[in-house]
Structures are given as C-alpha cells and as structure tokens.
Amino acid sequence: MRCALVLVLAACGRGPRTPVAISHHEAAPAAVVDTDGDGIPDGRDGCPTVAEDFDLYQDEDGCPDLDDDHDGVPDDKDMCFDTPGTDGGGCPEGCSYTTTSTDCWSRPLFTDASPPAAAASSVKQLFDAYPEILVVTLSTDRNAGEPEAVARARLERAERALVAAGVPAEKLAFAVHAERPAGSTTTDVFGLVTKQRFEDGKFRTAHCAGDMGSVYRVSRERNYHCKPRICGDGECWPPTEDHASCPQDCPR
C-alpha cells in the first residue's frame, strides 16, 4: 500500500519519481516550548511563565531568585548579595561594597610621546578582551587660556585613531575637564570605562582594563569586604557571617 501511494503522488507530479521508504516509527520532532523565553524549555522549567534571572545562583531551575540571601533587600539593590544584611542596604554591619578602584588606572592613553596608532591598537585589544565595555569616555584638561575647541580637538584626534583601529565610534564619549593652572600644560588624553553591560548588577567582580579603570564581570565572587568589629578583648565579625566568632558581650 505504501508503494501504491508513492506511485500515485509521482503520477500527479507531487512526489518523488522513485519510491522512498518511509518509516512509520519516526515522528517529527516536537517543537520546543519556552513560554518565558529564558532558554530553559517548559518541560524542565520550574517557573515556565517567569524568566530565570541568570546570576550564577540556581540558574538551572528556571525560576528567578530575586533575593538570594533572603534578607528582604532585592538582589538588584543588595550591596552584599550573598550575606544577609542589617543596614537596609543588604550588608551586615562593617561591610562595604567596592564600586571603583583608583588602582586600575593612572596613565594617559595618548601622549605626545606615544604613536597614536600603537596606542589605539592597545585600546582596541582591551575592547576585544572585555566585551562588557559599552562606553569609554575620552577626557583631557584645558590648558590655561586654551579655548575648549582646542582641547576637544585632542579628543577628536584620539577618536579618529581609535576608530581607525576598529573601535566603534558609538563606544566613545568625550569630556573636557576644568582649566589647568597657569604654567601647567598638557596634551594627554585619558580614557575611562564609564558604561558597561553589568554596571547595574551586583553579581560581579572587578578587573583592571589596562589604564581605563575597572571592568565588572558577572561572578559569584564577592566584590565587598566586611571588617571585624572590636568588642572587649576579641574581634567580633558580623554575626550573619560567623556566629561562633562573636563574643557574648558583642552587640548583635
């Protein structure tokens, strides 16, 4: 009967001209359903209508975890994402969150002594190494009595060199700083990462992007530090981190 069907289709010009074996045991693959569009199929998605928040914490279950440490402070506002806080900002007493690092940058990107093409190539390598970088702001100081247009021209020259090296122009911004004191002159152009993909997330760790400042990458590594509190003769760490190390007389 299968052969007869093939011959009829062929005669009508709708089928193959030679019989083709058809397996009745092979069904067409079912379409993958992913209602919330988070990349986890509904069949193994614990929350098929709510997208997972991919923050390297229980990302496989398909359910968003919006307060990982359950301290009442949402993750997007929690300065200490995996340690229950008591200060209203999500951190225990004595903890601080690092948002910048002045150790990561100090030298100008472009100087009179640095060939523009070589400097631009070095910056392009940093863009390639850190796809998280969305915008770098090029900046320079105005010299005493110097029109702002002249200072801005330095930034435009740097921009042209960077674009020629392959850095997209939309990833560059300009900033002309205040006028320098008389007798102090410069032609240096600095660059600083001013916008990046994860700038609003708390699940990140800092990396130094050459002389362009800090770049934050998604990570469960802490980017905050908790200092011990001193109570009497001993140290008292925030009790939410280590109850055992806190002496009885230490305020909780």
Image: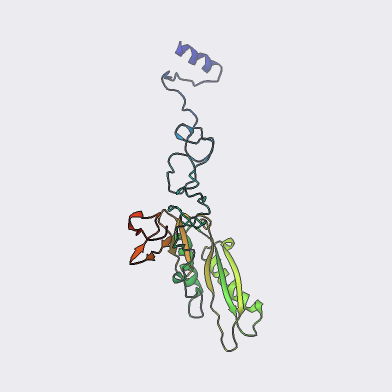
Q: Position of residue 185 (x, y in %)?
A: 56, 85
In the rendering, at what x and y percent does residue 15 appear?
A: 52, 20
Q: Position of residue 56 (x, y in %)?
A: 43, 48
Please name the residue shown 45% across and 13% down the image: 3
Q: Give the quadrant of the C terminus.
A: bottom left
- Color encoding of the figure: rainbow
Residue visible at 47% across and 38% down in the picture = 40
Given residues 109 and 178, the one toward you in this image is 178
Residue 12 in picture, x, y percent from top left: 56, 17
Question: Which is nearer the eye, 120 or 145?
Answer: 145
Q: Nearer the viewer, residue 174 or 8?
A: 174
Left or right placement of residue 96 versus residue 194 in this view: left
In the displayed structure, would residue 140 be above or below residue 249?
Answer: below
Instruction: Tell me where residue 232 sits by quadrant.
Output: bottom left
Query: Residue 243, located in which quarter of the rendered image?
Result: bottom left
Query: Which residue reaches farthest bottom?
Result: 183
Which residue is depicted at the point 44% across and 39% down? 61
Query: Outermost residue toward the front?
Result: 249
